[in-house]
Amino acid sequence: MRVLVVEDDKDVAGFVVKGLREAGHVVEHTGNGRDGLFMAASENFDAIVLDRMLPGGVDGLKLLETLRAQNNHTPVLFLSAMAQVDDRVRGLKAGGDDYMTKPFAFAELLARVEALTRRGKTDAPTTRLVVADLEMDLLSRSVRRAAQKIDLQPREFRLLEFLMRHAGQVVTRTMLLEGVWDYHFDPQTNVIDVHVSRLRQKVDKPFPTPLIHTIRNAGYMLRVEEP
Amino acid sequence: MTAPEGAALPPALPAAPSAASPTASPPLARSPAHGGLLRSASVRFGVIYAVLFGVSAISLAAFLWWSTAGLLERQVEDLITADSAGLAERYDEGGPQALLDTIAERVAGNVDDDSLYLLVDPSYHRLAGNLEYWPHNLTLDEEWRDLPIERAGIASLARVHYFELAGGLHILVGRDIQNRSSMRELLADGMLWAAAIALALGSIGAWAVRGLFRSTIADVSATAAAVSSGDLSRRVRVAGSEDEFDLLAISINDMLDRIGRLMEGVKQVSNAIAHDLRTPIARARTRLEDVARHAGSEAELRFGIDRAMGDLDGVVAVFQALLRIAEIEAGARRSAFVPLDLAPLLMDLAELYEAVADERGMTLETDIPESLPAFGDREMIQQAVANLLDNALKFSPKGGRIRLRAISPGGQGPRETGAETRGDVVQIEVIDEGPGIPEADRAHATDRFFRGEQARSTPGSGLGLSLVLAVGQLHGGSVALLDAAPGLHVVLSLGGAPDQGATAL
């Protein structure tokens, strides 16, 4: 996967670039908005990590707006120290696909970047999600595993749907909170863990192999256990 | 009306000398004395008043003049014209003799003795009338004129009409207008006096307007000056008359209250940064230094760094919460207010936390009506209620019962008020069976970083209730902490006065 990182802080940029490369991605980096815009417009990337405040006369918002005006729909994740609600709203309105505030944990950034690239690929509406022997029918809103029907509450259904759509990717607690509940704050209690554990009771417990895995210091992942 | 500002006036002097004076007294309200009188708004208002007053007085006088003096003049001419026409008719009907008789009759019948007649033959010899001789300076090319005459030795003034009859006879018909012209003079005199009085009254009025204006503004100006020099406790005097100036004073005072609160907030936050953030930062630093010096293995090193990162994440979370509260208190989010239904919002939150309560052996009961219309910021309300539920879960004993209730005392269902649907007052209540907050601490429980005795041993930043309060106030509501005996009963009120800042003028 090719990722463009537009970030002027050398330390942060170095940390992000190193981490993404370790995760197996091809990374290009530039420290100013003008070059960033040029690269984003002239080359093909699977995702762009974009700072809001950039030197070079073109800030992150401007860069993104220009890019979108050129009909370029490369997924963009804002990485910014501007943390107010309005800042996030403005970033998403300008065409950003996700918004993260600094300081951040790298695991969270990686999970979100990978989730973005997946989103870009599956644009066509799907009616059925399948992971191993787990099947979800989005039309009849039913779930089966190994031909056995699983009854889920509406929220559990959406939680599982989110995990299945991001199968094979790390999904953080914040991503779940935003994606499933549409909450943009951090509860002090481990609400997400409790809900995932309830889901496990239904989806994994009665079956020999677990599908929902906990990723330490990051979140969860739905995947087929490697033999 | 006035000269364009700055064009005719010298530029303002760079600084008032009082600013440089060494006395420690608070600066007085700035006086606009430099740069010409017209620069002072109060003088300008006074002058405008005087000019308006003068213009209306002059218009009134002109109208009076036209309608009295002018009317009299026209009346005289009308009378003369009618008289002349009558005489000409008599002459046409009965010849010269009839005319002579008529003139004699009219002269005799004129009680006021103001009618003038003179009939002369073609060689200007008097035939009849009460004038002695044909005025020698009368030129024949004008029909109307004012004529000085002398009757019985008294000089007088007459308005006369001259015309020629068939047969070469000339006739003058006129009226003595001496009385009328003296009345005109009287009128003119009166007008002059009136103008003088108007001038005097205008000046007094202008002076009074200026004084009134200045005294009303002076207090506002002095208060603003005192506040800008640091005395935030000063307020503009409200006269209690509820006029426009009172409303202005109230608005300014509200603004000053708000500035005061914001300043207080800034002070609290800087204190907090000085004291409450130093501790976790120091802890993280200590941990890092400790592992750097004493870690015996890589595993130990990693463990230490992980824990220090956890500490720093805590610091970041505190920062985030502080900034969020500041953002809410700044009121900027009010522009994002929308009409919304709180019932599904609360049910969603209850569902989110119910699982946690269940896992910890507690129960979460809800009592939420079908629909709870409100006007506000969805995200902020979510976060406030989540904080309350977080707290309840944190402090409740095992087996404890947590209740989430919501009521809309104004009634159920949406209510149309005017053009748009505004929500009613909504009360959201969270009741737990934990230790509660002692009476003495309740007043401080919503202060930033306040942590009660009971809470010291639990994780948390002491910002949860501060945020709840900020959200309540943003929505024109409040937060009440009650005793649930045992436990805490929090009432978050929203709505009621969605826009407390706006006062209609």
Image: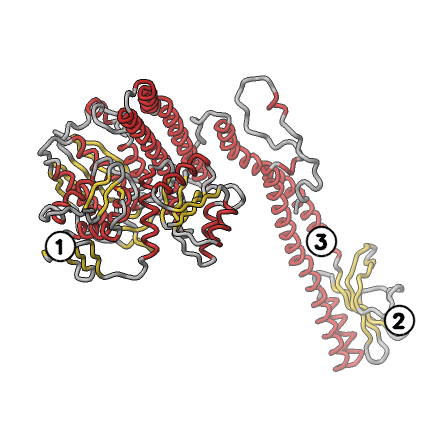
Measuring 25% from the left and 25% from the top, which residue is drawn there?
B451
Q: Nearer the viewer, residue A166 or A44?
A: A44
Residue B105 visible in the picture? yes
Residue under label 3 = B184
Q: Residue B34: x and y, percent?
A: 65, 31
Tell me the subunit letter for badge 2: B
Tell me the subunit letter for badge 3: B
Q: What's the residue type where badge 1 is placed? A: Arg
Cα gap from disc 3 to disc 2, whole angstroms? 34 Å
Q: Secondary structure at mark 2?
A: loop
Q: Secondary structure at mark 3?
A: helix
Residue under label 1 = A145
Cα gap from disc 2 to disc 1, whole angstroms? 141 Å
Measuring 28% from the left and 42% from the top, which residue is drawn there?
A174
Q: Is residue B322 left or right of residue A42?
A: left
Q: Secondary structure at mark 1?
A: strand
Q: Residue B457: x and y, percent?
A: 21, 23
Tell me the subunit letter for badge 1: A
Q: Nearer the viewer, residue A119 or B35?
A: A119
* Residues marked 3 and 2, same chain: yes
Residue B449 visible in the picture? no
Q: Nearer the viewer, mark 1 or mark 3?
A: 1
Residue under label 2 = B124
Neighbor class of circle 2 (other Cα within 10 Å; few <14, some 14-19, many 20+) is some
Neighbor class of circle 1 (other Cα within 10 Å; few <14, some 14-19, many 20+) is some
Q: Is residue B345 left or right of residue B32?
A: left
